[in-house]
């Protein structure tokens, strides 16, 4: 019987029975064994500030495969923004949208910011009234509504609450619309202010429906536009029933 028949391979010299493996064969076997998984210690110290604070060195364990390629772990998604309960002047000045949505600071009071924002809208209306024509008011209200969709949307996202109480630009634009269309006497304006605030706070249907459904800049502006519409409707009914000139 030949040596090749004993080894089961042609030539039989490399793997013959009873023959020790050569150095080349041992090296080939060693290369076939995958390398162990080891954590990379001190990696975070090398790149400070590049990863979330919740990461640790253990989270940065990487796997080295036989090809020598290092496979990094998945970076976790950023957590949701924590809501800001009481924005201050620093937040207001940090973005142009904040300046508009917070009513140039009128929405910053901790108590009844919507009422303070509406008072600001009333005061600005009285100041501009001698200088504005109907065309000016129509353009101001329309453009203010469009700007408010953007400003209230951005500010709501940055505050972590889509319709945060400090966002008062919607009240300002809505009270402009009401005061533009009601009689210009101080008594009528005061009555319009009170009716609008009651409707805006209580949010009767369908205002409550849209307020709950549309959690974005358009929704913030639209529900106060509906409150202005109901205020004007009540005024029209009142003047009709009382037989007063409008």
Image: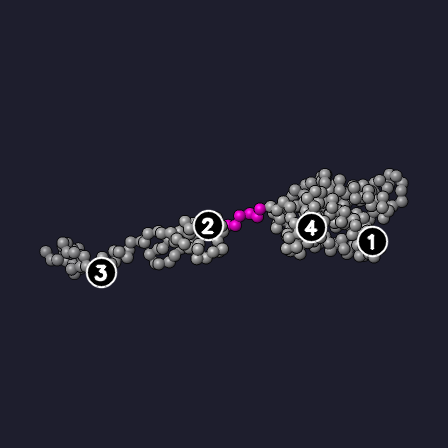
Q: Which residue is mark 4?
A: 102
Q: Earlier in the sequence, mark 1 or mark 4?
A: 4
Q: Earlier in the sequence, mark 2 or mark 1?
A: 2
The percent coordinates of residue 191 (x first, y second) are 82, 42
State whether residue 221 appears in this view.
no
Contact, mark 4 vs mark 3 (Cβ under 8 Å): no
Q: Which mark is residue 129?
A: 1
Q: Is label 2 in a helix, a strand or a loop?
A: loop
Q: Which mark is residue 78?
A: none
Q: Which residue is mark 2?
A: 55
Q: Which residue is mark 3?
A: 24
Looking at the image, residue 10 lies above or below residue 122: below
What residue do we see at 22% from left, 60% from top? 24
What residue do we see at 28% from left, 55% from top? 32
User: Distance from label 3 to label 1 (Cα)?
Assistant: 96 Å
Q: Is label 3 in a helix, a strand or a loop?
A: helix
- Residues drawn in magenta: 76-82
User: Distance from label 2 to label 1 (Cα)?
Assistant: 58 Å
Contact, mark 1 vs mark 4 (Cβ under 8 Å): no
């Amino acid at each position: 019987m030949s040596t090749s028949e004993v080894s089961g391979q042609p030539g039989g010299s490399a793997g013959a029975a009873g023959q020790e493996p050569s150095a080349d064969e041992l090296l080939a076997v060693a290369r076939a064994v995958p390398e162990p998984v080891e954590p990379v210690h001190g990696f975070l110290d090398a790149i400070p500030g590049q990863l979330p604070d919740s990461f640790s060195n253990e989270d940065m364990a990487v796997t080295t495969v036989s090809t020598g390629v290092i496979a990094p772990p998945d970076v976790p998604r950023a957590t949701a923004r924590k809501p800001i309960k009481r924005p201050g002047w620093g937040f207001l000045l940090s973005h142009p949208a904040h300046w508009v949505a917070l009513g140039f600071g009128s929405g910053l009071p901790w108590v009844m910011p919507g009422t303070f924002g509406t008072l600001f809208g009333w005061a600005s209306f009285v100041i501009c009234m001698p200088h504005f024509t109907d065309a000016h008011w129509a353009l101001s209200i329309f453009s203010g509504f469009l700007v408010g969709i953007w400003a209230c949307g951005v500010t709501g996202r940055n505050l972590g609450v889509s319709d945060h109480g400090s966002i008062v630009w919607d009240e300002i634009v809505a009270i402009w619309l009401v005061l533009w269309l009601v009689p210009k006497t101080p008594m009528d304006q005061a009555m319009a202010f009170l009716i609008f605030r009651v409707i805006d706070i209580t949010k009767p249907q369908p205002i409550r429906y849209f307020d709950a459904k549309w959690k974005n800049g358009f929704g913030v502006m639209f529900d106060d536009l509906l409150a202005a519409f109901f205020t004007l409707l009540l005024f029209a009914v009142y003047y009709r029933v009382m037989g007063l000139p409008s």
